């Protein structure tokens, strides 16, 4: 969506489909300084890196300089999002070193993806200057945000304003307006230049401190949860394996490791069939021997040289 001013509604999520790896924004938010960046993006997946500093521990200038070197951070999380369903598939806490249940978290970015933003009318936009109470028409100039991009201040740009109603089930801010401002000159940038939650005279601002391109993450790869084998049994001369996994699989990414002898066999998958959701059937070309134990591996999407082992050992029985 490159020209939101020409549309009746604005799909905030669509901008992330056009975003680039390294796009970032630093926000002052809820007593923290938070950096959101695109860690990685493929045709169907988006990985967001979130790093936070406590405002009680660092100044805003210190925070901006410490995000890339990860000093004194309060939290550090990677989220993988499905670009079609808008659902969080993987959430990994890099400080604690373990996976979080995607259904138990509620990152604000995912909430924004679900909202329907509509262009703000002129009388809904914030104005600059003192209101003349005797005037029949408010002719004050419309306010446009001043923002920093890659450390340099940007002002005087005419921005597009959009707002959406926040669902009532969101604690404290349900029913309020969420407003975002986009600079049409930044067509290939996915983050708003300004965003806030507004409710009449009261306003809660998430103040952007900086944004831009080329954020250099100190993380090399998003860890992957291991596939879970829910069922496996013999079918004719093939082995049918039913698995549950949080990411796509195909015949080119599967290996198996035979316990005796210690060898890795590649290209042993005949075909892969999707059952439903994240459940698949894997048909092996070479039927294993009875009572042999096998360890199945799959290569990582982000690092083709990294093997991820399944949780369970596959043991073939009659």
Image (cartoon, rainbow, N blue to C red):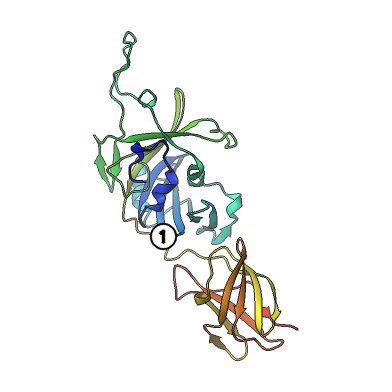
Q: Quadrant of the C terminus?
A: bottom right
Instruction: Using the image as rendered, state which of residue 267 and residue 47 is in the foreground.
Output: 267
Drawn side of residue 28 relative to residue 175, left or right: left
Q: Residue furthest bottom?
A: 261
Please tell me which residue lies in front, 39 or 113.
113
Question: Which residue is pictured at 39% across the width and 61% down the height?
Answer: 218
Q: Which residue is mark 1?
A: 40
Q: How many marks?
A: 1
Q: Please indicate whether residue 22 sits to the left or right of residue 317 in the image.
A: left
Sort mark 1 into few (<14), some (14-19) or many (20+) by Cα contacts within 10 Å: some
Q: Position of residue 134 (x, y in %)?
A: 32, 8
Whether residue 313 is visible: no
Image coords of residue 163 (percent x, y): 43, 33
Q: Nearer the viewer, residue 146 or 242?
A: 242
Q: Is residue 161 visible?
A: yes
Q: As displayed, is residue 67 above or below residue 142?
A: below
Residue drawn 58% across and 54% down? 102
In the rendered view, would you say 222 is above or below 52?
below
- Residue projecting furthest to the right: 318
Relative image position of residue 18 (x, y in whole percent): 37, 52
* Disc 1 element: strand
Please state the horizontal and vertical placement of residue 306, each as a whole percent of the image: 48, 74
Pick the front one: 255 or 197: 255
Q: In the rendered image, which quarter is residue 142 located in?
A: top left
């Amino acid at each position: 969506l490159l020209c939101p001013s020409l549309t009746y509604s604005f799909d905030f999520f669509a901008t992330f489909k056009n975003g680039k790896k390294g796009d970032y924004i630093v926000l002052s938010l809820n007593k923290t300084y938070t950096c959101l960046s695109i860690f990685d993006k493929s045709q169907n997946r988006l990985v967001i890196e979130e790093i936070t500093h406590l405002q009680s521990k660092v100044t805003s200038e210190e925070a901006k300089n410490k995000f890339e070197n990860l000093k004194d951070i309060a939290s550090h999380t990677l989220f993988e999002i499905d670009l079609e369903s808008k659902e969080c598939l993987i959430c990994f806490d890099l400080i604690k070193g373990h996976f979080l249940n995607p259904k138990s978290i509620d990152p604000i970015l995912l909430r924004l993806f679900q909202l329907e933003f509509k262009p703000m009318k002129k009388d809904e936009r914030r104005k600059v200057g003192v209101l003349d109470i005797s005037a029949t028409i408010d002719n004050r100039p419309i306010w446009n945000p001043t923002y920093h991009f890659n450390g340099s201040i940007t002002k005087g740009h005419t921005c597009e304003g959009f707002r959406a109603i926040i669902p009532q089930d969101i604690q404290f801010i349900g029913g309020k307006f969420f407003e975002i401002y986009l600079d049409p000159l930044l067509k290939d940038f996915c983050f708003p230049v300004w965003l806030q939650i507004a409710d009449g005279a009261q306003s809660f601002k998430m103040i952007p401190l900086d944004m831009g391109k080329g954020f250099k993450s100190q993380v090399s790869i998003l860890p992957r949860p291991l596939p879970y084998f829910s069922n496996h049994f013999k079918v004719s001369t093939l082995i049918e394996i039913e698995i549950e996994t949080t990411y796509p699989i195909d015949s080119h990414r599967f290996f198996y490791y035979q316990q005796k002898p210690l060898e890795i066999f590649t290209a042993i998958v005949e075909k892969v069939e999707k059952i439903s959701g994240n459940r698949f059937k894997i048909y092996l070309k070479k039927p294993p021997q009875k009572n042999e134990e096998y360890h199945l591996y799959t290569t990582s999407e982000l690092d083709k040289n990294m093997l991820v082992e399944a949780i369970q050992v596959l043991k073939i029985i009659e």
